Amino acid sequence: MSSNHSDHHILPMRVYAMTLIGLFVLMGATLLAAEVHIGPDGTSLYNNLVAMLIAITKATLVVLFFMHGKYSTNLTKIFIILGFAWVSLMTLILADYGTRRFEPVPGWDREIESALPRDFHRLEEHRPKSEFEVNVRARP
Amino acid sequence: MAALHDAHAAHGHDSALHHQFEDIEQQNESYVVGMWAFLVTEVMFFGALFLAYTLYRWAYQTDFFYAAAELDRTLGAVNTTILLISSFTMVLAVHFAQLKNKKAVLINLALTVGAAVAFLGVKSVEYKAKFAHHLYPGPNFEWHGEGNPNVIQLFYSLYFVMTGLHAIHIIIGIIAIGCLAYLHFREAPSVKDDFVPTEMVGLYWHFVDLVWIFLFPLYYLIPSLSRGGH
């Protein structure tokens, strides 16, 4: 009984070899996708999407076959899925950073300097203006 | 006495089974779930750094492109290949641990450690070149190419923190696999009668590979914003 149970976990070596070949093919694809510009000029969004899709596919192959995720118990699967679902919470933080330029805080679009306090406008008068602000922001 | 013996036979036909578990399946599940709980904390650990990277990459795409051009794509690809092969040899070690083939386990663990050392060797060559070109964050940082030097320095801060943390994981992996190989060599019952300890070290090693799968395109393969290469 026991040996039957543990035997079905022993996968043929072919599965691992196929996974390795798949990972190599995807590595070649990601190298190639980095050399070719995809989509319109001025944005690398499509290149980035392709690169990340390939990386996620590679990671899925590793989790499913090398880490035996496909053959694990349901409880283990919950841990695996929740672990990686956590990373997707990052998108919520990106929503914050992505919408900050809509926020009525003066000076958000200034040149790169340092992290500024929220009440920095009190100090605004005493601060020397950068070239960027004089030329671009001062326009009516 | 006979009843006790029967109970033991019915319960403990597998010498790897510890007394607090109902059966070997429950024990294996507990081991693997525990290992995954640890890996989830690792995902969070690296996830925070990936988030920091994402925010700065988003804000300074062009500068990151100039900075990444200094990284050696070929060495990065070589290291990716080395890690993928080491993951394969590690999973073969688990496979042969299931089949109780001691010699094959030891060979595959040795190959995995060899690949890990080779990875660190390539990495040290890369780090050396960065140090020689003053591309490490701090007062000695120098940048003569295109792009904002402060942002380039930010890129290299993230590069050294994330690849350095990954390298520390590789070193820990070498130690863990080394200890595992020693136990297999000594034919310790903990690894001889039960393949799950080998599987758990394998899970850790595959996680290290997993992190590199994302680090490689994010650092070495930053695409240009347009066809012209800018």
Image (cartoon, rainbow, N blue to C red):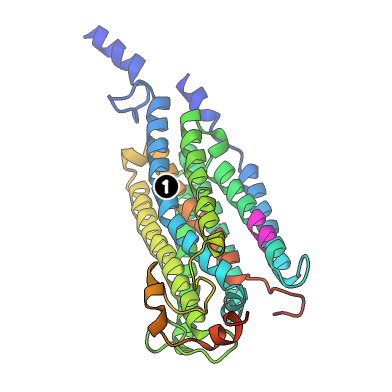
Which residue is located at x 34 percent, y 17 percent?
A: B11
- Residue type (three-letter) at the residue carrying disc 1: Leu
Is A50 colored magenta in this rendering? yes
Q: Residue furthest left?
A: B1
Q: Nearer the viewer, residue B217 or A98?
A: A98
Q: Residue furthest bottom?
A: B144
Q: Quadrant of residue B48?
A: bottom left
Q: In the image, is residue A4 above or below residue B221?
A: above
Which residue is located at x 27 percent, y 13 percent?
A: B5
**Is B221 positioned to the left or the right of B130 in the image?**
right
The spot of residue B113 in percent (x, y) is: 44, 60
Q: Residue furthest top?
A: B3
Q: Residue furthest front?
A: A140
The spot of residue B97 in percent (x, y) is: 46, 41
The spot of residue A69 in percent (x, y) is: 54, 39
The quarter of the image holding the C terminus of chain B is bottom right
Task: Look at mark 1 in the image and give the residue it sits on.
Answer: B39
Span colored in magenta: A48-54
Q: Quadrant of residue A124?
A: bottom left
Q: Nearer the viewer, residue B98 or A51?
A: A51
Q: In the image, is residue A2 above or below residue B186?
A: above
- Viewer can see residue B125: no
Which residue is located at x 32 percent, y 39 percent?
A: B190
